Image (cartoon, rainbow, N blue to C red):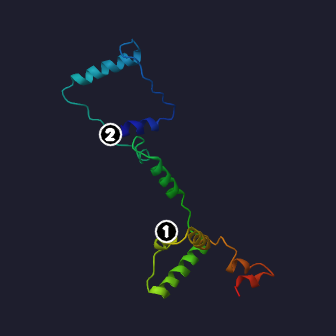
Amino acid sequence: MKTLVAHLRLRKGVVIIEKVKGHAGIEGNEGADELTNEGARKELPDQIDINIPKGYELHGARPATITQSTVYKGIIKKLATPECRGILVHLDITRWAINDHNSELPTDDRIWISLGDKSMSREVRAFLWSTMYKAYKVGGYWEHIPNFKHKAICH
């Protein structure tokens, strides 16, 4: 089936597949019946090249088995944007702060997972998450704005 689909996709023109009623006297259908009978009478089957032309291989999930969740996860994974420098800096600050506290260096994934830990209140999790994404106007945000540099440091 994959080979058939690949060869149909190779064609430049539009391909219309139509179901026709058997033995209705339609020329193409009658010719197909004759070829089928001829093939059935052969002692040895024809050798058919079932190699799929390069660039026409079908990949991905079968529509009958795919779920909305699988599709969504695939889309999100494909659209994943690289983390910005500020986030990487905050991850490193967090990592080394943890290292100072208990002598271990967590991975980026471990840090992100810990930000969603249910042992913290939702407000604390939201604050930590937003801080990691530099959503608050704190610290370095003010350093490049004239007359507001003093706001970068808490007193």
Q: Residue at x 40, y 15 (%)?
A: 27
Q: Residues within 10 Å of mark 1 (few under 14, many from 20)?
A: few
Residue 87 located left or right of residue 141: left
Q: Quadrant of residue 80?
A: bottom right
- Specify the farthest residue to the right: 147
Which quarter of the image is occupied by the C terminus? Answer: bottom right
Badge nearest the viewer, 1 or 2: 1
Q: Which label belongs to residue 118?
A: 1
Residue 134 is situated, as x and y percent measured from the top left of the image, at: 64, 72
Q: Quadrant of residue 57?
A: top left
Residue 1 located left or right of residue 72: left
Residue 146 located left or right of residue 112: right
Residue 88 is situated, as x and y percent measured from the top left of the image, at: 56, 75
Residue type pointed to by label 1: Lys
Residue ID for mark 2: 50
Task: Work out whether 15 lies above or below 106.
Answer: above
Q: Residues within 10 Å of mark 2 (few under 14, many from 20)?
A: few
Q: Residue at x 45, y 78 (%)?
A: 106
Q: Secondary structure at mark 1?
A: loop
Q: Quadrant of residue 32?
A: top left
